[in-house]
Amino acid sequence: MLQPLTTETVLEALTALHARYGLAIDQLADIRQAEPKERDEAWLLAGRVLAQAAGREEKLSGGLSES
């Protein structure tokens, strides 16, 4: 079962993705201090980054192909 995402878990995941894929996510480091609208935009960006990285990982590991 998946655990709910928190700011901390997203930042940990993004940090790991940055280290692994060299993604430019440095601007997300201060997500907790952002204004509500900026924070929402940062969450959307974080979701896209995670989805892209998951897709890359799946392709690299020979996972299911996209249809």
Image: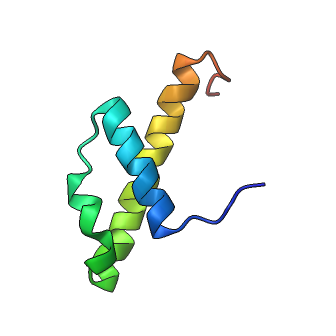
Q: Position of residue 12 (x, y in %)?
A: 43, 53
Residue at 50%, 59% (x, y): give it: 9
- Looking at the picture, does residue 26 appear above or below residue 53? below
Residue at 45%, 49% (x, y): give it: 13
Q: Position of residue 19 (x, y in %)?
A: 32, 36
Q: Would you say 12 lies left or right of 35 here?
A: right
What is the count of numbered marks? 0
**Quarter of the image that includes the C terminus:** top right
Residue at 58%, 26% (x, y): give it: 58
Residue that sits furthest to the right in the current view: 1
The colour scheme of the drawn protein is rainbow
Q: Position of residue 8 (x, y in %)?
A: 45, 64
- Looking at the picture, does residue 9 appear above or below residue 15? below
- Looking at the picture, does residue 42 appear above or below residue 19? below
Between 21 and 16, the one lying in front of the other is 16
Between 58 and 1, the one lying in front of the other is 1
**Quarter of the image that includes the N terminus:** bottom right
Q: Would you say 35 lies left or right of 11 here?
A: left
Q: Would you say 61 lies left or right of 46 here?
A: right
Between 59 and 13, the one lying in front of the other is 13
Q: Position of residue 32 (x, y in %)?
A: 33, 75
- Looking at the picture, does residue 29 appear above or below residue 51? below
Residue at 62%, 15% (x, y): give it: 62
Give the quarter of the image for residue 3. Answer: bottom right
